[in-house]
Amino acid sequence: MNFVKVHKDLVVFQKSFSAAMEIYHLSKSFPKEETYSLTDQIRRSSRSISANITEARRKRRYEKSFINKLNDANGEAAKAQNWLDYAFA
């Protein structure tokens, strides 16, 4: 039996994936003129959070790479929050 935790088992991955999916569904109702700006930006940044967490998990043996990818995930979370602020405004 394999007891190695994969990235999909991490709560932080699950929450970031769920948030990105919710953003995707909510952004379907954005105005059409926002399709290539706000909609695209918010979807890409929200998806990038879980992607960076996945990559960090794979690089966990290399502390500097691991930390760098977690910092990238944190940066993308801040970026997604910024785009959400615009969407709600």
Image (cartoon, grey):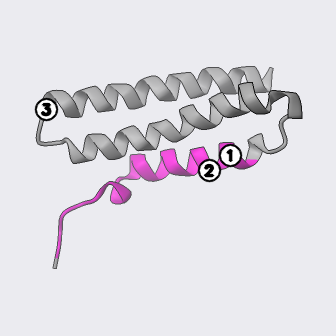
Q: Residue 9 location, x and y as percent?
A: 34, 60
Residue 66: percent from left, percent from top:
22, 34
- Mark 3 and mark 1 lie on one chain; the one further toward the N terminus is 1
Front residue of this view, candidates 4 and 35? 35
- In screen coordinates, is 2 left or right of 23? left
Above or below residue 7? Residue 1 is below
Three-letter amino acid code of the residue under disc 3: Glu
CB under 8 Å between discs 1 and 2? yes
- Disc on res. 24: 1
Residue at the image position 55 percent from the left and 32 percent from the top: 45
Which quadrant is the C terminus positioned in? top right
Q: Which residues are magenta?
A: 2-25
Of the 4 image quadrants, the one containing the N terminus is bottom left
Check residue 79 for magenta coloring.
no
Q: Can you see residue 31?
A: no
How far, Cα to Cα, is label 1 from label 2?
Answer: 5 Å
Tell me the element at label 1.
helix
Residue type, mark 1 in image: Tyr
Q: Is residue 29 visible?
A: yes
Spatial CA distance of label 2 from label 3 is: 29 Å
Residue type, label 2: Met
The residue carrying pointer 1 sits among few (fewer than 14), some (14 to 19) or many (20 or more) residues within 10 Å by Cα, namely some
Neighbourhood count class around disc 3 (C-alpha, 10 Å): few under 14, some 14–19, many 20 upward = few
Which residue position holds label 2? 21
Secondary structure, mark 3, is helix
- Residue 63 numbered mark, or none: 3
Q: Position of residue 50 (x, y in %)?
A: 44, 43
